[in-house]
Amino acid sequence: MASSARDKARTWQGSFRPRLAKAIASPLFLGGVLTLAAGLRLWHVFELRGLPLFDRLILDSEFYDAWARRLAAGNWLDTSRPYFFDPLYPYFLAGLYRLFGRDVLLLRLVNVALDVGVVALVGVIGRRVSSAAVGNVAALVYALYRPAIFECLEVEKTALGVLLLTGALALATSRRGWARFLAGVSLGLAALARGNAILMAPLGVAYFAIVGESAKERLRSVAAFAAGVLLAVSPVIWRNHRVSGEWILTTAGAGPNLYLGNNPWNPTGAYQTLPWIRPESEHEEEDWRAETRRRVGRELTAKEMSSYWLEETFDYVRSHPFETALVSARKVGLLVADSELPDAWSVDFLRRFSPPLGLPLVTMALLFPLAALGAAVSFGSRPARLVTCFAAAYMATLVPFYIFARFRIYYVPALAVLAALGLSWLCQTRPRKALLGLAAVALLAAVSLAAGGFAGTSSSTNHSQQFANLAELYAERGDFERALRLLDVGLSEHHKAALLCRKADLLRRFGDVQGSVRLANECVEVDPGYPDAWYTRGLSYEAAGDRVTASQSYAQQLEFVPGHAFAAWRLRALIAGRPLPLPR
């Protein structure tokens, strides 16, 4: 009787597994994955539509929006100077503005469409690397990746750049001859959206140099790929040369960006504000130029300025080898850490307001271990090696610079394919091997969870800045009550300078001058190096009528941030005896 029951169980399992595999491999399953991906992303976008951050763009989003509006107004060539920032996204936005007008909801819906396109491409790559079932599972993994859902809200170049880079990988896995050329075009365009992507070109050349039945075919593939890359970037090279007389590949920001990741003020490898840089994109190039001019004693060309900061970076690395090695190790940790380092807004912060982000979704702590397992068990396959090398090479291009969460998502599609390979192996291998694989996954998951702490990043600091930014947007609306309530919630969780300074400023604008002075002093005690700490203190003391202390505060602000124009402006006015109206 027992034997009969076991036989029936084996028969049921033997018939169930093929049916399940067939269902997963079906086009209907992929259609469901794409629908799920679109639904989660649209849900996230519409949940946040009532918050002030939806319509009011800040930091890079505000900068790209302003750039796009100038382009859409007719200044398409923009002959002022060589590009300092990657140019493709503002041109993409400008095209949308000319066709449909400026509509932030439309921009976010376009992001949803772009990211659903990435889901589809992940499915294509997985199918070519292994099978339809692996491709569909890979698409599902990426569809459920929480930071990818979050990025659809951001009016930023990430969605476009990820689509182009993933498209280049998908085309590279095709056997069609014309796909080599289009892979180069897609990679070149990706480099115009995310500059470090150009460093992936040598990987493409090496791959096509070994793929092919004859030397002639391999040579044609390399030539077609290289021609595609060159075709995509050549208009920008031509434009940069026309406006400056210098040969600049895509942007003149390589030197400053490299220095941002390797300098005495950056112990973690994440983005750290330098003393002479105001934390707004619109001022960044100007502040780099001013500091370069101060150090060198003359105005440098765009290429000379980039070269100067490259040399400064190399000097720092040569003279601080131990510190550089430690920071580089921390950068590697940040690349696989489960924590997400925010730019304008944080995925972890917005989970408070967006129910889909609060779902038990895929994060790096699950994705990275499964991808590592998939890479290990499938490395004998040439297409799988390409995907593994693609992910590793892109991660390597980030290590010399600095790390943001949105920089990491470019290699997530490749990790999703590798994770699907790992899951497929776990389902098909013998139980003993599967247990060893699961143990390895658990160990790497623990590494991912601990990596953020090793890098020295602080979620409380990140969240405090998010509270402060959102409160400021409520204040811009005139809703001071809600802004103050939000700051109080933030201060109950994180006693940080960003929150103290923002509340001090709001209390001043609300009429509570004594409360503003008290909190401004507390802000500089908690973190005297916070970018606006002393400026906020100066405003508070000016409101209280103490112009001497206000002047001292503005002078102190300029010690920490020499390029702080507002502090310099108000200090000059106080010294001249003509105080300015306080900002409201």
Image: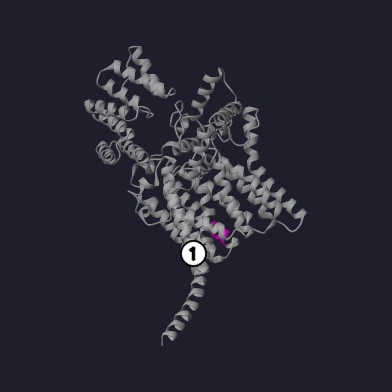
Residue 207 appears left or right of 313:
right
The extreme top residue here reads 576
* Picture quadrant where residue 298 is located: top right
Quarter of image, res 558: top left
Q: Residues within 10 Å of mark 1 (few under 14, many from 20)?
A: few
Q: Residue at x 68, y 49 (%)?
A: 206
* Residue 307, placed above or below residue 123: above
Q: Point out the image quarter for the C terminus.
A: top left
The N terminus lies in which quarter of the figure?
bottom left
Of residues 470 and 276, the one nearer the viewer is 276
| Image mark count | 1
**Residue at point 67%, 59% (across, down):** 175
Residue at (62% x, 60% y) in the render:
380
Locate residue 487, reporting x and y percent.
28, 38
Compare residues 177 and 70 and report the one nearer the observer: 177
Can residue 28 be seen in this snapshot?
A: no
Q: Between residues 129 and 371, which one lies in front from this camera angle? A: 371
Q: Secondary structure at mark 1?
A: helix
The residue singled out by tag 1 in the image is 31
Q: Position of residue 221 (x, y in %)?
A: 71, 52
**Observer able to see residue 3:** yes
Give the left or right position of residue 276, taking residue 74 as reference.
left
Residue 85 horizontal side relative to residue 507, left or right: right
Whole-percent x, y for residue 235 in the image:
64, 38
Q: Amino acid at mark 1?
A: Gly
Residue extending farthest bottom: 1
- Residue 510 vertical placement versus 9 (above, below): above
Magenta segment includes 121: yes
Magenta segment, prevailing SS (helix, strand or loop): helix
| Residue 271 relative to residue 479: left or right | right
Range of magenta residues: 120-126
